[in-house]
Image: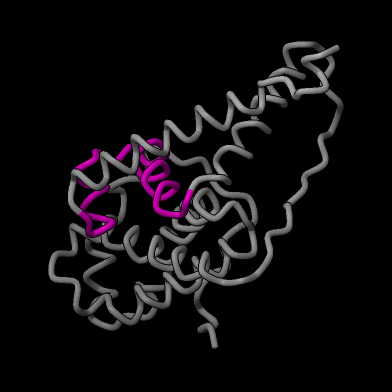
Amino acid sequence: MVASWLPIPSEEPTPIGGNLVGCVDIDLVVRAQRGDQGAFASLAVVVGDRLHAVAQRILRDTDLAEDATQQALLSVWRDLPQLRDPERFDAWSYRLVVRACYAESRRTRRWSPNLHVLPVEPRTAEELSSVIDRDQLERGFRRLSIDHRAVVVLHHYLDLPLDEVADVLGVPLGTVRSRLHYAIRGLRAALEADLRPTTREAVR
């Protein structure tokens, strides 16, 4: 059962970027390590939305992302006393949420889209094109493996250097570079495939 003081992240992922890296109060981490539940509750509030944003971008499913975030926070609570260097809390917490995402992705649960109603329909050709581009990118990203998604999210959304991505994932730097290369190539191929006319369209 999830502890009552573990916060439920907001449904919408918060914006993610370099400003989310290295912003945890080290003193808060140290006090939480010593068993201070109040400090951990505050720490969980600080990192909860950020971990949820990472999980949401990797899993592309709100319910799975919430489950992965809760599992990651439970792992943080359980394993925090063993963290040797509190200054490495950020990278360590990302590692835990990525592991939780891997576990959730192995479920046989079928994906159901999280639909959001647009307040108004696109009014211009430019707005319509933007919606289409986002939809194509989303479909392309869903076609990537979980390994490839994780690398893209950590590097392009969290702005982590590739060596830090390798550290978070616990794999060699060369593996990260290879996964990123194939992920970008896969996205480009998916986008090109979406733009390619079907046989029926081509013969018109």
Question: Measured from the top left, where is residue 160 in percent x and y?
Answer: 29, 41
Q: Main secondary structure of the magenta part?
A: helix
Of the pair 152 and 121, the residue shown nearer to us:
152
Q: Quadrant of the C terminus?
A: top right
Question: Camera-side residue: 69 or 22?
Answer: 69
Percent x, y for residue 131?
72, 26
Judge whether residue 162 is colored magenta. yes
Residue at image point 64% right, 30% down: 134
In this view, the residue in front, 155 or 51, is 155
> Which residue occupies 44% across, 64% down?
102
Viewer-proximal residue, 166 or 26? 166
The structure residue drawn at horizontal position 64% and vertical position 56%, both measured from the top left corner, is: 11
Q: Is residue 175 left or right of residue 47?
A: left
Residue 27 vertical placement versus 132 (above, below) = below
Q: Report the magenta residues as a range.
A: 145-171
Image location (x, y in percent) of residue 5: 50, 78
- Occupied quadrant, residue 118: top right
Horizontal relation, residue 110 to residue 5: left or right: right
For this orientation, the residue located farthest to the left is: 84
> From the viewer's perspective, is residue 176 above or below residue 106?
above
Q: Quadrant of the N terminus?
A: bottom right
The answer to whether 102 is drawn above or below residue 203 in the figure is: below
Q: Judge from the rendering whether residue 132 lies leftward or rightward of residue 29; answer left or right.
A: right
Residue 175 forms part of the magenta stretch: no
